[in-house]
Image (spheres, grey):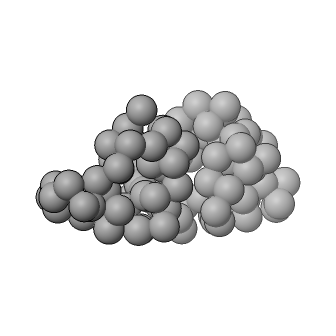
Amino acid sequence: MHVCHNDGDKDNNFLFNLRWDTRIGNASDKKKHGTFLFGETSPRSIFTNLQVLKIRELKKEGISNKKISAIYKCSEGAIRDIIVRKTWKHL
């Protein structure tokens, strides 16, 4: 179980603002409150939104995943996941 903040403010720790919920419920709250880190806002992201769109554009132009991965200095798997929308689904 997770402690969730009803208003999305992690510093508002008054009892009326807290509730127990599941991990999924907590993630849903983060999306609703705009505090869920994904895409280029994630600290683990190595791409920007514009780079992801460019990668998909290069693939449509017939450039191989291997060449695209060399351009962006990343794995072919990362490129494949972007192209098939396993990652970066929101774009």
Q: Position of residue 16 (x, y in %)?
A: 25, 61
Vertical relation: 74 (above or below) 7: above
Q: Is residue 19 in view from this perspective?
A: yes
- The quadrant in which the C terminus is found is bottom right
Count the numbered circles shown.
0
**Which residue is drawn at the image coordinates 70% and 35% (left, top)?**
66
Rendering coords of residue 22 (x, y %): 49, 39
- Residues 48 and 61: in front is 48
Residue 8 at x, y = what percent? 32, 63
Q: Farthest residue in the front direction?
A: 16
Which image quarter is the N terminus in? top left
Q: Position of residue 49 (x, y in %)?
A: 52, 64
At 38% from the left edge and 38% from the top edge, which residue is drawn?
A: 2
The image quadrant of residue 56 is bottom right
Left or right: where 5 falls relative to 47: left
User: Does the rendering let one see residue 46?
Assistant: no
Residue at 16% x, 58% y is: 14
Direction from residue 89 to residue 2 in the image, left or right? left
Nearer-the-camera pick, 47 or 17: 17
Identify the residue at image location x=41%, y=68%: 33
32 or 41, which is in the foreground? 32
Q: Is residue 32 above or below residue 84?
A: below
Judging depth in this view, the residue of 3 and 86 nearest the camera is 3
